[in-house]
Image: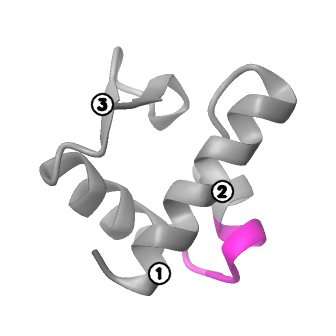
Amino acid sequence: MSERQERVLACIRGWIVEHGEAPTVREIGRRVGLSSPSSVLYQLRQLEARGMITRTGHSWRSCRLR
């Protein structure tokens, strides 16, 4: 797993602890320093492909850690 993917995963984990739900794509981008939503989406798709996160719906806000 790349350093950027580790930062995204840590962001999701921390956000869920703080807020009780997953962050939006833009919230992830702000926390990890990615200005482009497409860059965040790429990282999320990579994490999903590796089985690190799953989604219960279409939105990334529904993602869960595995």
Q: Which residue is mark 3?
A: 54
SS of the residue under disc 2: helix
Circles 1 and 3, Cβ within 8 Å, touching? The answer is no
CA gap between label 1 and label 2 equals 10 Å
Mark 2 vs 3, N-terminal side: 2
User: For this view, does 53 lie left or right of residue 23?
Assistant: left
For label 2, the residue is 11
Residue 4 got which mark? Answer: 1
Does the rendering let one see residue 24? Answer: no
Looking at the picture, tell me which residue is in the foreground, 18 or 40: 18
Q: Is residue 8 left or right of residue 11?
A: left
- Determine whether the residue tagged by mark 3 lies in a helix, strand or loop: strand
User: From mark 1 to mark 3, how far is it between C-alphas?
Assistant: 18 Å
In the rendered image, the vertical position of residue 63 relative to residue 35, given as above or below = above
Tell me which colouring the rendered structure shows.
one colour
Residue drawn at point x = 56 percent, y = 78 percent: 36
Residue 15 lies in quadrant: top right
Q: Quadrant of the N terminus?
A: bottom left
* Dot placed on the residue nearer the N-terminal end, 1 or 3: 1
> Which numbered disc, 1 or 2, marks the residue that appears first in the sequence?
1
Residue 66: give x, y in percent of width and height. Answer: 33, 31
User: Which amino acid, by three-letter code, is at mark 1?
Assistant: Arg
Q: Residue 26, relative to residue 62: is it above or below?
A: below
Q: Amino acid at mark 3?
A: Thr
Label 1: how many residues lie within 10 Å, few (<14), some (14-19) or many (20+)? some
Is residue 49 on the magenta stretch?
no
Instruction: Give the Cα distance between marks 2 and 3.
Output: 15 Å
**Range of magenta residues:** 29-36
